[in-house]
Amino acid sequence: MGEEVLGIIDTGRWYELLFFTQTRIVVAKTTRGGLGFLGVIGIAVADYSRKKKSDELKKLSLESVLEADKRNFFIPYSSIQKVEMKKRRTVSQINIIVDQKLDRSMMKKKDKTTGKDVYWYERHFKKEKFEDHVNLVRSVLPDKVVVLQ
């Protein structure tokens, strides 16, 4: 049967879906984005493309999702040190802090408590989904979730 998807976080205009399973997060690109320079029309085209690609990805196995785009990758739960979640005024934010660089989009930072290098994966999502997404992440990583105000 394969891995079961326990839940999905759609990052909207960050153009990614985060598939949560029992052992990892699969990060899938939904479009290349970058059409904002075309104004409202470019944003509309990118949003339509993102929605269509999201619907297609949700029907695939996780291995097929990973193979669908060379930029897709996964984050094993074993490499996650902490997940910070913050509800802001307009959007909510998820920061996944890991011990190794798994994708070029991750930023390198120093951990304030240990002084060691960590890699930071930051994305935003709709603020209306905050509680649902916190509950999803807590269900798979109960001891690693920190909710920030």
Image (tube, rainbow, N blue to C red):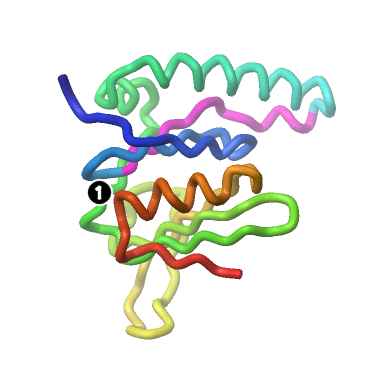
Q: Is residue 143 magenta?
A: no
> Where on the picture, by quarter, is residue 14?
top right
Quarter of the image for the C terminus: give it: bottom right
The residue drawn where x is 55% and y is 25% is 31
Magenta range:
25-37
The residue wearing badge 1 is: 76
Residue 138, x across and y down, in percent = 37, 55
The residue drawn where x is 47% and y is 53% is 134
Q: Nearer the viewer, residue 85 or 45?
A: 85
Residue 129, x across and y down, in percent = 58, 43
Residue 124, x across and y down, in percent = 59, 48
Up-down relation of residue 25 to residue 42 (above or below):
below
Q: Residues within 10 Å of mark 1 (few under 14, many from 20)?
A: some
The residue drawn where x is 50% and y is 45% is 132
The residue drawn where x is 33% and y is 50% is 139
Residue furthest left in the image: 1
> Where on the picture, by quarter, is residue 59?
top left
Q: Secondary structure at mark 1?
A: strand
